[in-house]
Image (tube, rainbow, N blue to C red):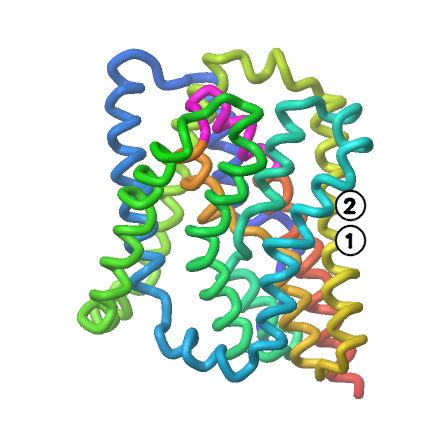
Amino acid sequence: MKRPNFFPDTYTLLLVGTVILATMLPAQGAVATLLSYLTTAAIALLFFLHGAKLPRQAIIDGLTHWRLHALILGTTFVVFPILGYALKPLLLPLIGAELYLGVLYLCMLPATVQSAVALTSIAGGNVPAAVCSASASTLLGILITPLLVNGLVIPTVGAVSSLDSVVKIFMQLMLPFLVGHLLRPWLEQPFRALGKTLSVIDRGSILLVVYGAFSAAVLGGIWEQVSSQMIFGLVAICLILLCLAMLFVYGLARWLGFSREDRITALFGGAQKSLASGVPIAQVLFPASLVGIAVMPLMLFHLLQLIISSMLAQYLRNQNILK
């Protein structure tokens, strides 16, 4: 089996490059207007693809392993937000109010799919359960994340009204997702033939959204608000959140008597956050001037979770081989 790479992957480097490009050449005027339309279309396409790729059988199979999925989803949507609020006395002095809101937003996001399943496979975990929990997390995240953000974050930043958010979420996220999922029986074979092309479209859509978000943030003076000290503080906070979540979900899985395979699935399914869902949802929920700063903690967390989780997956794999 291929060994995981402990260094940033190509996609992560492209994300960093997109932020640098937006910093040096932010979209303005007519270009920004055109980009806003393209971004809206890219978000709809992204969630259409999410829906089309969601295995319906994974949702059905998950009903038979509800204790594991309840632990994973509870960590994702309950424990993470509690940690975000509990750490507020530490977070505010280090990173300031706006980045703290970005951390809260990170805590309310669904789990990642691709890396959680891949890492579970490398470490020798329960891969079918990982597919199921990750798929369920993505689906629930479209509903739960906006509700949490609308109730706990948006009132403090003066974003669009709850009703406007609900309409935008349905039109830009849920409707394309449902259409894609309903068309899955007819799209499964063509998608399989396209192979990596779909991944390029999927990730390219996210890069486009990131560029638009950071262009607006740069024009709004983001780098005048965020110092290097705040960035280092944000890295430390992301590490703390990631480690606490991993210790909690793995420790509780062990206490509940889960098998080794299920503990590994809980570890990688419950302690990771989705960049693929997080960036588009932020684009819908937050004002354009706040999207860039809202997703900055998520981008750092994404990088750290890949590095640390890859190291853990390799360790667990080697540990299993030696038995």
Pick the residue in front: 214 or 19: 214
Query: Is residue 21 in sight in this rendering?
Result: no
Query: Is residue 22 in sight in this rendering?
Result: yes
Residue 269 rendering spot, x and y as whole percentages: 60, 64
Pick the residue in front: 185 or 118: 185
Indicate yes or no whether the magenta region holds residue 288: yes
Q: Residue furthest left?
A: 186
Dot 1 corresponds to which residue?
Answer: 244
> Residue drawn 67% across and 23% down?
97
Question: Can you tell which quarter of the image residue 129 is in?
Answer: bottom right
> Residue drawn 60% across and 69% down?
70
Q: How many marks?
A: 2
SS for tag 1? Answer: helix
193 relative to 225, above or below: below
Amino acid type for the residue under numbered disc 2: Ile
179 relative to 288, above or below: below
Q: Which residues are magenta?
A: 286-297
Amino acid type for the residue under numbered disc 1: Leu
Q: Residue furthest bottom?
A: 323
Taking the image as shown, residue 6 lies to the left or right of residue 13, namely: right
> Residue drawn 63% across and 39% down?
300
Dot 2 corresponds to which residue?
Answer: 240
Magenta stretch: helix, strand or loop mostly:
helix
Q: CA distance from mark 2 to mark 1?
A: 6 Å
Taking the image as shown, residue 298 lies to the left or right of residue 147, namely: right
Residue 285 rendering spot, x and y as whole percentages: 43, 34
Q: Are marks 2 and 1 in contact (CB under 8 Å)?
A: yes
Indicate yes or no whether the magenta region holds residue 158: no
Residue 57 rendering spot, x and y as whole percentages: 38, 79
The quadrant of the rendering that contains the N terminus is bottom right
Taking the image as shown, residue 172 lies to the left or right of residue 237, namely: left
> Residue drawn 62% across and 36% down?
297
